Image (cartoon, rainbow, N blue to C red):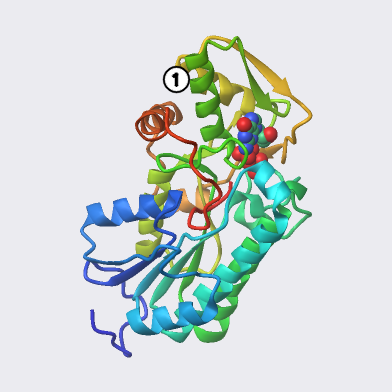
Amino acid sequence: MKRDGNAPRHQTIGLEDKVYIAGHRGLVGSALTRRLTREGFKNLILRTRQELDLADQRAVDAFFRKERPDYVFLAAARVGGILANHTRPAEFIMENLAIAVNVIGAAHRSEVKKLLFLGSSCIYPRHCPQPIKEDYLLTGSLEPTNEPYAVAKIAGIHLCQAYNRQYGTRYICAMPANLYGPGDNFDLETSHVLPALIRRFHEAKTAGAAAVTVWGTGTPRREFLHVDDLADACLFLMREYDDPAIINVGVGEDLSIRELAELVAEVVGYQGRLVFDPSKPDGTPRKLLDVSRLSRLGWRASIPLREGIEQTYRWYLANFAGHAPHSAGSREDTVKG
Ligand code: GDP
């Protein structure tokens, strides 16, 4: 689509626009690519990490100057579960800061019309009231197990807001709940809880193991959003949302890790015992997003948790079960919950 310097301020994303999905191989980026393709978008711009290293500012600038995307979904990030965040804090803060600085800066320099930046529910203070309203950002200290990641994501939000204020750009920021779905990372050391449990229960069932170990006490509560719901919300927000204030994306319900483990065991068909390992960190006690801002705009999640887990288990069976474990913590993946 031709760039028009005098275009109306609130023009919206169209099927002919050039749309760059940063991180299209990751959990969120691949869901967005599926969603936009299904919608009929004709000019998706996609680059693997080998083709474009988002930590390389000159390469990112050159890419934006050449391709001149109209719209950008920034779904690239270094992500991982509670243990990966704990063991590799330097990478989690450095790479996520670099991606935010490089992509948002280049978007501004090449006059991108609108950008959606993905954050995470872990940006909120560890002890904030539940459900978590967007306004609680920066009202208290963060959960230590993912503080470096959270600080990088908060910096990304502030970058977007600063550019909006100073230059009148349209950079919006969505904060999803803990994500799961097809394309997730199933590596037991670096994954998030839901894919880890699918794999543990599947392997225990196959091996006829009497018990499965679940990290922590089982009491922390988490909210799980299917990544296809998130992709739908991202497109909705790109079309409908033009406020610099961050916006939560979730389902509005949570459950304990014990309840989640029981549900995954049921879906997988594992009938042995659950054993909790309190030597592993629990992380933040509860993370339930207040989704009223998004509901008022007219969007709600549609994939029930059980159905989402069943579908993700089928994907795991088709793609991983019996294969070599896949390497984890991809930088093209996104959004740690
Ligand atoms: P968090 O939301 O940032 O804490 O991310 P995680 O998905 O990594 O962990 C969520 C909760 O699940 C924490 O309380 C973990 O201790 C617990 N958990 C239980 N078993 C596992 C597991 O096998 N892997 C992970 N990552 N977490 C687990």
Specify whether 61 is left or right of 279. Answer: left
Residue drawn at 64 percent across, 58 percent down: 135
Mark 1, ligand 1, within 8 Å: the answer is no
What's the amino acid at mark 1? Val
The location of residue 130, given as percent across then percent down, is 66, 41
Q: Residue at x 51, y 21 (%)?
A: 203
Q: Is residue 134 left or right of residue 58?
A: right
**In this rendering, is residue 235 above or below 194?**
below
To which residue does mark 1 refer? 267
Locate residue 18, reporting x and y percent: 29, 72
Residue, x 55% and y 28% (percent of image)? 197
Q: Is residue 176 above or below residue 314?
A: below
Image: 178 above or below 26: above
In the displayed structure, does residue 161 sit left or right of residue 9?
right
Q: Which of the 4 image quadrants contains residue 321?
A: top left
Does residue 137 appear anywhere in the picture? no
Q: Using a 10 Å C-alpha cutoff, classify the residue at mark 1 as few (fewer than 14 neighbours), some (14 to 19) or many (20 or more).
A: some
Q: Is residue 152 visible?
A: yes
